[in-house]
Amino acid sequence: MHLINFKDLTGQQLMEIIDKSIEVKRNPEKYRNALDGKSLAMIFQKTSTRTRVSFEVAMTQLGGHALYIDWRTTNFTMADIYDETQYLSRNVDCIMARLKRNADLQGMAEASRVPVINGCDEKYHPSQAIADLMAMKEKKSTLEGVKLVYIGIYNNVCNSLVEGCTKTGVKITTVTPIFNEPSRDEELLENARKTGLYETTLNVKEAVKDADFVYTDTWIDMEFFLDPKYAEEKEKRIKLMMPYQINKELLKESNAYVMHDMPIHRGYEISPDVIESSKSIIYEQSENRLYSAKAILLKLLGKY
Ligand code: CP
């Protein structure tokens, strides 16, 4: 079993991982030796703080071991991904990869003898969405009927939220004036629409009024944020997206908790006063990456 997105998981299986994340958070000692002697290879083509730290610490706290592998320092750069993954999967028990292209991640999963976890590609970010759903369940005790409004660019994080929410009974509304085309997955959107839980609008003020959670993400993908070649597109996006910034004015008639998957670009997609407000659960949400990483590893390694 791999975790590339949520397509192969039923809603019930996804709920089990969310509930296990909460249970692991409450009872860390119970899982202290659960992955004794197991190794996780973590391979990164892109930068990361949370995904790297959470999975590495998760393995240590479960009694196992994680290897951080910078793609650029390996022979993945010059060889076929199939051959390199064949080798890698004969030495470790699980692979977590943050690759630029979902097609490469799919190739890795096909070649691997051990489970492969998507650590975020251009289409999906499933481990993030599990931590997000966990944070929501902690706040509301249930996910059934809860309403999340995602405001920003329609991207990989948004895909996994749409898929994760609609599989677990959460109503999700997207307010996304720009669609990041590399993230497009029509099948995922069609499946979400069929549930009746997914809708999209550009009326941001109306959308947030009855929201339980309001969520945003960066307007610029991480690999482009500091790239001078992307400067013009960045300026264009900032101008178009500024009316959709999450700030005190937008939330004045809303009682929603505020979420962000981080890294945050203060003053762009969200204002600093909202990040630090009592309704912000952003840091709890990011802390939950650790517990959800543990639950994902335990699931894929057959421990529940
Ligand atoms: N949210 C998230 O995936 O953070 P990193 O990019 O720092 O891993």
Image (tube, grey):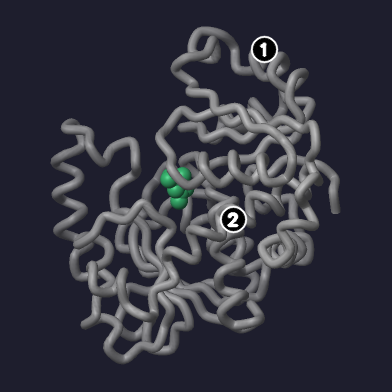
Instruction: Read off the residue under disc 1.
Output: 83
SS for tag 2?
A: helix
Residue 242 image point, x, y percent: 19, 65
Q: Is residue 43 left or right of residue 30?
A: left
Label 1 packing within 10 angstroms: few (<14), some (14-19), many (20+): few
Q: Is residue 278 visible?
A: yes
Would you place residue 278 above or below residue 302 in this image?
A: below
Where on the picture, by quarter, is residue 191? bottom right
Kind of residue indicated by mark 1: Asp
Q: Is residue 204 left or right of residue 172?
A: left
* Residue 295 in picture, x, y percent from top left: 71, 54
| Amino acid type, mark 2 | Leu
Taking depth in this image into account, of 13 and 189 the one nearest to the observer is: 13
Q: Name the spot of residue 208 as percent of width and height, x first.
A: 37, 82
Placement of 272 over or under 297, stated as above or below? below
In this rendering, does residue 183 appear at all? no
Q: What residue is at 28 percent from the left and 37 percent from the top? A: 224
Quarter of the image where the C terminus is located: bottom right
Q: Which residue is mark 2?
A: 188
Residue closest to the eye, 199 or 88 = 88
Up-down relation of residue 70 to residue 74 (above or below): below
| Residue at 48% over, 58% down | 286
Q: Quadrant of the N terminus?
A: top right
